[in-house]
Amino acid sequence: MKSARSTGSTAAGATRWWVLALAGTAQLMVVLDSTVVNIALPSMQDDLKMSDATRGWVVSAYTLAFGGLLLIGGRLADRFGQRLAFVAGLLGFAAASALAGLAPNAPLLFAGRAAQGAFAALLAPTALSLITTTFTEARERTTAFGVFGALTGVGAAIGLLVGGLLTQYLSWNWCLLINVPITALALVRVPAVIPATTPVRGRPLDLAGMALSMLGMLAIVYSLSEMATQGWSSPLVLALLAVGPLLLVAFIAWEARSRHPLLPLRVLRDRTRAGAFLAIGLPQVSMFGFFLFLTYYLQQILGYSPLQTGLAFLPLSLAIGVGSTVITKMLEPKLSPPALIIPALLMMAAGIALLIGAGPGGFSVYLTLLLPAELLIGLGLGCVIAPSISMATAGVGADDAGVASATVNVVQQLGGAIGIALLNTVATTAAAGYLATSGTSDARARADAIMHGFSVSLAIAAAIVVATAVIAGFMLRSRATLPLPESREEEVA
C-alpha cells in the first residue's frame, strides 16, 4: 500500500505534466497563428476584397501587436499571477480569434488579428513562466523544455499544414475560429492545475518603460514590414529604422535608473543568458525566410496546391519534434549545452545551403533536395531551441520568470519579423536585378529570376546561422552551477 506522502508526490507529478500540457497548448496556438493564415491569404483577399497593398496587414497586425507588447505581457504575468494572466490570455485570444474569423470586412479582420497579437503577448510569456517555475528537477526540466521547444519549433510549420487543410476543406475562417474550441478545452483544466496566487501589490508598473519598449519595437517591426513594399530608401522606412533603435537605447537607459523596471537589466547582464537569447532569436531570421522561400517555391515553381504545400512541410515539423525531444533528451546528459547547440546550428546552415541553386523539377527534386534540407534544418533547430530556452530562463528568480520568458518570445518574434522583411526584400531586389540584366522577361526568365532571388536570400540566411554558431561559441557556458527557480510543487500539491 502506498504511503500518503508517495501518493501526494505522484499526484503532484501528474499535475506538473498537466501544466506542461496547458502551457504547450497555449504556445502552439500562439506560434501557429503567426503562419496559419499564410496559405489562406489568397482566399481571404478574394472573399473580403482586399487590395494587394493591404493584404499584408493580415500578418503584420498580429506581428506588430505581439512583438510590441511582449515585455508588457511578461511583467503583467509577474504582477497579477500566473493563473489570472493565463486565463485572461486564453479568453482574450479566443475572443479575438472569433472576431477575426467572423469578420465581414478587412478592417475588422485586421482589428481581430491585432487583438490576437495583444493577448498572445500576455499568453506566451505566462505559458513559459509556468514551465520555468514548475519543473526544477534536472531530468524533468529537460523533458519539459524539449516538449515546449518542439511545439515552439513545429508551430510555424504546423500552421502551414493546418492552414492548407482548413482552407481547402472548410474555409479560411476556420484557420482562426479553431482557437475557440481549443481554448474551451484548456480552460476546463486550469482551476485544478494552476494554483491561484495573490497579485503582487505595491509594485507600480513601469509605464515609461512600457511606452519606450513598445514604440521602439513597433517602429522596428513596422519599418521592416514596410521595407518589402516601399524599398530600402523610403523616407518612412529610414526614419523608423533610425527612431526604433534610439527608442530602445532610451528604454535601456531608463531601465537602468528605474526603481521598478519593466525589464530588469540583471536578466540580460549574464553572458550565457544573453547568448541564449541570441541563439533563440537569430536563427528565426533565417527560418522565417526559409518558410517564405519554400512556400513560394512549392506553389509558384513546382505547382503544389495549398494542401500539398502544407504536407510538404510535415517532415520539417517531425524533425523539429524529434530533435527537441528524443535527441536533446539523449544528448543533454552527456554534452554541455554549447556542445549541443553549436553543431546543431551548423547542421541548420548546411540544410539551408543545400537549397541554394535549386530549380524546377518533379518529385525527384523534393526527394533529393527539399526533404534532406528539411531534415537537417528541423533536427538542428530542434536541438537548438530546447537547451537555449532552458539556459535563457535558468537561474531567474520567481519575480522575473514572466519577463524572462517574455524576452524569449520577443527575440523569436523580432527575429521572424526581421527575417521576412529582410530576406524577402533581398530576394525581390536580386530577382529584379537578374531580369534587368537578362534582356528578356518571358515566363522562363521570370522563373529563373525568382530562383536567383531565393538563392541569394538563402545564402544570407545560411550565413546568419553560421554567425550565430560563432557567437554561441564565445558567449555560452554551462548552466550546471546556476540555481534554478523556486519549485511550485508544494503550491500545486
Image (cartoon, helix red, strand yellow):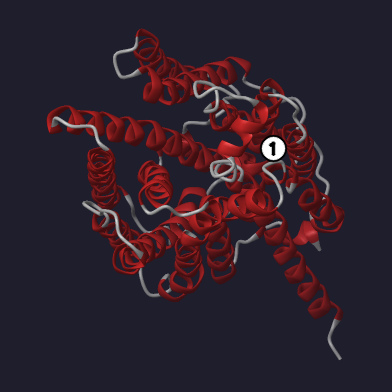
| Residue lying at 80% horizontally and 72% vertically, measured from the top left | 11
Tell me if residue 271 can be seen: no
Please say if 88 is above or below 212.
below
* SS class, disc 1: helix
Query: Can the viewer see residue 446?
Result: yes
Q: Quadrant of the N terminus?
A: bottom right
Residue on which the image places disc 1: 77
* Image position, residue 448 (x, y; %): 23, 43
Question: Residue at the spot x=51%, y=58% of the render?
Answer: 308
Q: Image point 44% across, 15% down: which residue?
A: 247
Q: Nearer the viewer, residue 451 or 388?
A: 451
> In this rendering, is residue 250 above or below 28?
above
Q: Left or right of 177: which side holds 254? A: left
Q: Quadrant of residue 85?
A: top right
Q: Residue 361 location, x and y as percent?
A: 30, 59
How crowded pointer 1 is (Cα within 10 Å; few <14, some 14-19, many 20+) is rated as many
Classify 346 as above or below 215: below
Q: Position of residue 252 (x, y in %)?
A: 45, 22
Q: Is residue 137 above or below residue 394?
A: below
Q: Is residue 275 left or right of residue 389?
A: left
Asked whether 396 or 454 is in front, the reply is 454
At label 1, the amino acid type is Ala
Rendering coords of residue 298 (x, y %): 41, 52
